[in-house]
Image (cartoon, rainbow, N blue to C red):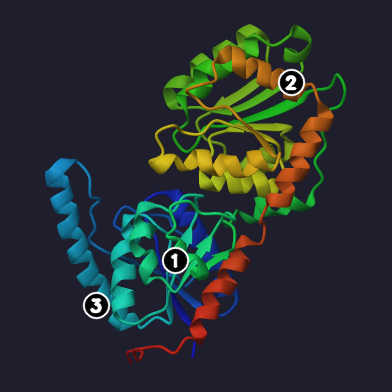
Amino acid sequence: MTVRIVLAAGGTGGHLFPAEALARILVARGAEPVLVTDPRTSGFATDLPGLAVHRLPLQPMRGGVVGRIRGGLGLCAGTLAARGLLRRLAPDAIVGFGGYPSVPTVFAGRNLGRPILLHEQNAVLGKANRMLAGRATRIATSFPTLRLLDPGLASKVVETGNPVRPAIAALNRQPYAPPAAGGPIEILVMGGSQGAAVFATRLPEALARLPDALRVRLRLTQQARADDVEPVRAAYARMGIPAVVERFFADVPDRLARAHLVVSRSGASTVAEIAAAGRPSLLVPYPHAADDHQTDNAGHLVRAGAAWLAPEGTVDAAGLAALLAGVLDDPARLAAAAAAARGLGRPDAADRLADAVLALVAIPPAMERAA
């Protein structure tokens, strides 16, 4: 009988991408993944034949007291709907990827006796996963340490890493070539899915402060918000820096492969991709991220010598310029950081996660699959 695995994920791409990566591996291994998500999710694994997708009636708990009440009622309704759905599907195991869309499915699955694996993408256990951790059979982590995890649950933890796109995982096998003396220096700036204002203002100001001999070597590729694209292009044009500035890049793996340095936020997927690709980075954590998890994510690379940290609230344009000058004009330093990043990378994270999930199937099920 085919092993059936329910994947509970929704909301942001940070939760959905690991679910999609796992689904592809499970299909390749002959298992049957089923996605349970919320109504907002679209375009998930559109080229993955045979993947069933079920959407539960869910609302986030936000917007003050009224919003939380609505969200709480939606959670109850979603849990009831998930319970009925799981009775019909009778999965062998359930994987939750965090975020509120995963909560009702994991709640219902545990009540029905299904083994549960939670995957945490960040270095800090998220709110939804904290709520569910006590019910989990296993907790798969992307980092060696996980802040806000109850120490009593440590025996449940298995480190798998955070899955990255195959094209980026392939970069782990390609050596890093630091910039040649006096040659071009390729910088890739990624501001997250919505861009980041700090990269549209402070970064150009910092580059303008660099010595002329260093600045003329720069080649920029930068993701920016729609309102920032033209101003950023103009700023670099005034400095004579060749720059490609767009809202979105479809060829990130190619641009990452060419990058001598990545300047970025430190979301879970971004950090995983930088490490898997083996690229040195300067990380500017988003200061308002829940539980300051982006600083924890960045710290994992910084402590290993793979990255440099530039906190948005404490490093001004002059400080950023000094940091960049010390890094960009030192090929050996860049190469050492690239090697450290590659050592942290988990290009096989999707396979490791699939191993952990399928290991749960050996646990005797508590309910029979519906005919």
Left or right for 252, reference 11: right
Q: Which secondary structure, mark 3?
A: helix
Question: Residue under circle 2?
Answer: 326
Q: Is residue 248 among what the camera can see?
A: yes
User: What's the residue at 23%, 68% (across, down)?
Assistant: 79
Q: Which secondary structure, mark 1?
A: helix
In the rendered image, which quarter contains the C terminus? bottom left
Could you say which quadrant of the image residue 98 lies in?
bottom left
The image shows residue 361 at horizontal and vertical percentages of 49, 83
Residue type indicated by callout 2: Gly
The image shows residue 162 at horizontal and vertical percentages of 56, 56
The image shows residue 138 at horizontal and vertical percentages of 48, 71
* Above or below 354: residue 129: above
Residue type indicated by callout 3: Gly
- Give the CA separation, mark 1 to mark 3: 32 Å
Which residue lies most toward the front here?
A: 152
- Give the CA separation, mark 1 to mark 2: 44 Å
Disc number placed over residue 306 in the picture, else none: none
Left or right for 324, reference 366: right
User: What's the residue at 73%, 25% (across, down)?
Assistant: 327
**Proximity of marks 1 and 3: CB atoms separated by less than 8 Å:** no
Question: Residue under circle 3?
Answer: 84
**Mark nearer the N terminus (1 vs 2):** 1
Question: Residue under circle 1?
Answer: 152
Residue type indicated by callout 1: Gly
**Can you tell which of label 1 and label 3 is closer to the viewer?**
1
* Above or below 34: residue 343: above
